[in-house]
Amino acid sequence: MAGLKDGDDYKDGEFFKSPALLKLVCFGVGFGGMLLFFILRFAMPDKAGAMGYSWLFAVIFFLSLAVGGLFWTLLHHATNSGWGTVIRRLMENLATLIPFILVLALPLLISGFGFRDALWEWFPKRAAVLTSANEAAAQEKDAYIAERNAVIARAQGDVEQAKKDLAEVAAPSPGHRAHLEKNIERLEAKAYKLSKEDLSDEGAHATLVDKHFLHDEALLFAKRGYLNETFFWLRQIFYFLVLTAIAFILRGWSVQLDKDGDPKWFRWMRRGSCGFLPFFATAWTFLVFDWLMALDFTWFSTMWGVYLFAGAALNSMGVLIILVTVLRKFGYLKNVVTLEHYHLMGKLMLAFVIFWAYIAFSQFFLIWYANITEETRFYLTRNTGLWNAYTIGFLVVGHFFVPFTILLVQKVKKLPVVISCVAGWNLLMHALDLYWIIIPERGPSLTAHLGEANIAMTIPGAWLFDILALVSVAGIFGFFLLRQLSSASLFPCRDPRLDESLNVVN
């Protein structure tokens, strides 16, 4: 058909020349800002807790964008999507930023920086209750062993007495004999169970520690199999390895396909993505459980992982739209990206605006309807004071109604500048959404030791740390993104689906 583009005409790809000055600015702002942030942290040790919340907010915001890029890459291959081939390399570049951002999260995880215990209160609470429980167990151990040995001796004595009682009955009726034998079996089972109790010094100590742990922190005791430092670090290693490996394996195969055109790389990407998706979903879900939901370890939501996934997918698509628009403005991708691609990206962004709102409302509705204290405290905190107006203004109106109304108009989705502005708006709302998740925990957590009457909802002046952290991580994110953009062709130039993408119409 006349007028169709041929993928063979683009087999050499298109390469981005990263502006040296822009990279230098990003490097200076990012690493300079980070250096200043940590200088302030050690210069003002009393502000360490507040600054931990700031750094978590900045890191999780940019991590969600990178993880969203990985999701779109996986989805593109798993569904054999052809339309997005020309923008897939941008998705891959975004995904490969994951390890750099996870490295930035290390100060949050390492206790020496003073952030970890302020963010995740289960760490110091667990340590304190275990210390207290160990001290009490050491004092009670000898008496406990003597008491339990006496209980075992009594149980064994009861068995012997029951057997003696049966033997002394001269001619018991069948019913009477059955009753006595059943009683003997019950007492033997009880004695056997008691005899299996570990009454060594170590066993008795462990039993008493659990007893005091349960008494002092029942909820933390119930979650001890998950909320313990060893398993916590194993999970962090799992997140890093899984998300990083998936991102770099897929990009490596994609770049190799550019070099030799061997279709095996295309097949590997398709098959690999289908296998990688469950690992991706598990890693991201439990990461946001550990980093965000565990800010209050007593709270839980079964929809939490999906809620954070929806925001990541929505706003990474916004980043892709903005990236494409900026690159086209500077002369790149003009021959391969058309308004049809904008239209499709706009429809996906609209779909995830609706999906995010649906999940957000469903989570709120289920918690409101159940009215369980451990669940409702999350929303009660965020409905207090100015946070209530913040929720209605930014999340209900700004995050849903504004982009939903604009993106319903078909023409808007084919206007690059307009839809890029909508994408930018969504990114701002996403930042405010994550801010709403993290920051309301800061005031009550850091002032709880002052007593219920003196608990504060905010920490004065802490917003300055929030801005500094966000700007710093943004600079580092921009620096590595520019580096990745210039490391390979801006689009997969030998992908078998390139023809379909070049000529897409919807």
Image (tube, helix red, strand yellow):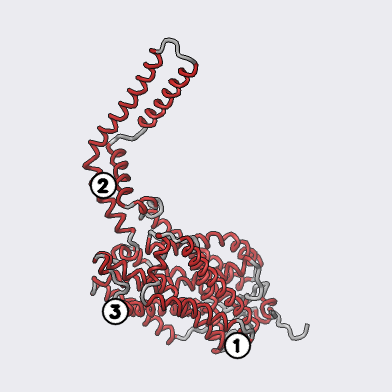
* Distance CA(mark 3)–CA(mark 2): 40 Å
Q: Label 2: which residue?
A: 134
Looking at the rendering, in which quadrant would you find the C terminus?
bottom right
Q: Label 1: which residue?
A: 415
Q: Rate crowding at label 1 as few (under 14), some (14 to 19) or many (20 or more) other CA atoms within 10 Å.
A: some
Q: Amino acid at mark 1?
A: Leu
Q: Amino acid at mark 3?
A: Gly
Label 3 vs 2, first from the N-terminus? 2
Q: Amino acid at mark 2?
A: Asn
Secondary structure at badge 2 equals helix
Determine whether 338 is above or below 497 in the image: below
* Distance CA(mark 1)–CA(mark 3): 40 Å
Q: Of 142 and 62, which appears nearest the observer?
A: 142
Q: Rate crowding at label 2 as few (under 14), some (14 to 19) or many (20 or more) other CA atoms within 10 Å.
A: some
Q: Of 138 and 502, which appears nearest the observer?
A: 138
Residue 140 placed where, x, y %?
A: 23, 40
Q: Which mark is residue 461?
A: 3
Q: Is residue 167 left or right of residue 8?
A: left
The quadrant in which residue 293 appears is bottom left
Q: Looking at the image, which residue is at 23% across and 47% down?
A: 135
The quadrant in which residue 455 appears is bottom left
Label 1 vs 2, first from the N-terminus? 2
Front disc: 1 or 3: 3
The answer to whether residue 283 is visible is: no
Label 1 vs 3, first from the N-terminus? 1
Q: Rate crowding at label 3 as few (under 14), some (14 to 19) or many (20 or more) other CA atoms within 10 Å.
A: few
